[in-house]
Amino acid sequence: MTFQILLSIAAIVIAASFAIFIYSKFGRTKIINASKEAEKIIDEAKKEAENYRKSAVIAAKEEWYQEKLNFERETQNKRKETEKAEKRLLEKELALDRREQIIIEKEKEVLTKEHNIQNRERIIQAKSERLDQLIKQETDALQQIANLSKDEAKNALMKNLEAEARHEASGLLSKIKEEARAQAEETAREIVLQSIQRCATAHTAETTISVVVIPSEDMKGRIIGREGRNIRAFENLTGVEVIIDDTPETISLSCFDPLRREIARMAMSKLVSDGRIHPARIEEVVKNAQKELDLAIKNAGEEITLELGIIGLSPEIIKYLGKMRFRTSYGQNLLQHSKEVSYLSALLAQELGLDSVTARRAGLLHDLGKVADLNIEGPHAQIGAELAMKFGENETIVNTIGAHHEEIKPTTPYAFVVEIADSISGSRPGARRETIEAYIKRLKTLEEIAASFNGVERVFAIQAGREIRVMVQPEKISDYEAEDLARNIARRIEKETQYPGQIKITVIREKRAIELAK
């Protein structure tokens, strides 16, 4: 029994020991597995952290690279702008240097010419004193030899000396004139050609007739109306003559007033397109056309001021500018002419160192008087100056408008600039047209003026009146007197006639010596 108990205890101890062994073995395995799992998790966390770190580094590098590109791009743009600004400054400095050099050269030329003139004056003074001595000597000699009275001898001497002095003065004047003309023509030609080449506007030749297209020949009868009541109502309301002839599908509107003709054209076009034509409808359409034309005039004035960059004009002046669109001068559209004069004035002012804005403004307004009301009397330059003063323009603009045809004394250089620009615009080929009667009359007048001078043998107006050839008698006109004759003819033509552009006067003096050998 005791042995069984001992055996049982031993079995229990063995079983317990075995259980303890088994438990300790499996627990260690779990611990090892858990450690491995923890290490694995730690490794994955480290790898993930490393990946996040690399991603963050890559993103930071990309952002830095992008910032670097933006910075380099901005730096390059600023560098280009700086280079352009430096280039513009350099060009301006070079231009200023050239102008300064030109001014210095011109000052030297002026000083040289003044010195030459002073020398010539001293020479003339010396010659004058010498002539006085010769007059006295010749007077004494004539009284002793010819037994003439003092007055008779004096008259004879005065004639001789006057001819001699005139001859010498003509030679001296011709030389000075040629030197000044050579310099002035070169500079003026350069300035004018530069301005013309930079400005060219279209010219439109207006007529006194507007044509309206109609859809069919039946429309002509509807326009005339029963016993002509429609056409009479239309003519009375518009002041325009309606011409209906055999021309297919067209009618003509004739009137010397372009504003009335435009109202009539707009009204007739609406009546034709609408189809309802009777006196009441005609009156309604004509009133609407008048309103539309007033709006078109206002818009035209505003458009030209915006195009030229002119600000501060009063609404009344803008309205006058809009009316220029429907006015002509010598066949040249007045608004286009004023626009061209404005551009040319600004360009000439820039070349001469004047304010181009003032010149552009004066050029646009120089013909303001041509669209003034009929109840205002006077030359158009004077009327334009009065209107400009009335609507608040400054004194420079007012004087420039009034003096651009030399009807009043110019007090500002802009008057000469606008006068030159006006002449350029009017004398351009094709800008203005002239009737055959006026053309023939002008040629005849030019020939008569040239032929009225003493010593002129024959006169020919050539090149459409742009040049006059004057043949003189060589025994009556000397070489120096020929130059005086050309100058006197030019001055008289300028005073007595009106013409576009300029006229060249060529005096031809031919001396032929003929002898027969027998």
Image: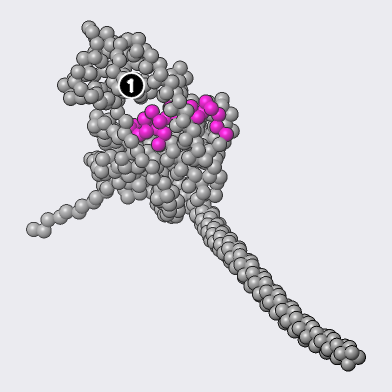
Observer-nearest of 453 and 414: 414
Q: Secondary structure at mark 1?
A: helix
Question: Residue 178: x and y, percent?
Answer: 41, 53
Quick one: quadrant of the C terminus? bottom left
- Spot the residue most to the right: 2
Q: Which residue is rendered at x = 35% and y = 42% of the image?
A: 428
Residue 254 in view, yes or no: no
Q: Looking at this view, name the residue that lies furthest to the bottom.
A: 3
Circle 1: residue type? Lys
**Viewer-side residue, 268 vs 439:** 268
Q: Residue at x 27, y 25 (%)?
A: 212
Is 450 within the magenta?
no
The x, y position of residue 286, in whole percent, is 37, 17
The residue most toward the top is: 227
Residue at image coords 56%, 27%: 391
Residue 391 located left or right of residue 487? right
Tell me which corner region of the image, top left, top right, bottom left or bottom right, holds residue 69: bottom right
Q: Position of residue 366 (x, y in %)?
A: 47, 34
**Above-or-below relation of 293 to 230:** below
Q: Is residue 313 magenta?
A: yes
Q: Quadrant of the N terminus?
A: bottom right
Magenta stretch: give its range: 312-336
The residue nearer to you, when weighing 338 against 511, is 338
Residue 228 location, quadrant:
top left
Q: Residue at x 68, y 77 (%)?
A: 44
The residue where tag 1 is placed is 270
How many residues crowd around disc 1 within 10 Å: few (fewer than 14), some, or many (20 or more)? some
On screen, residue 463 above or below 54: above
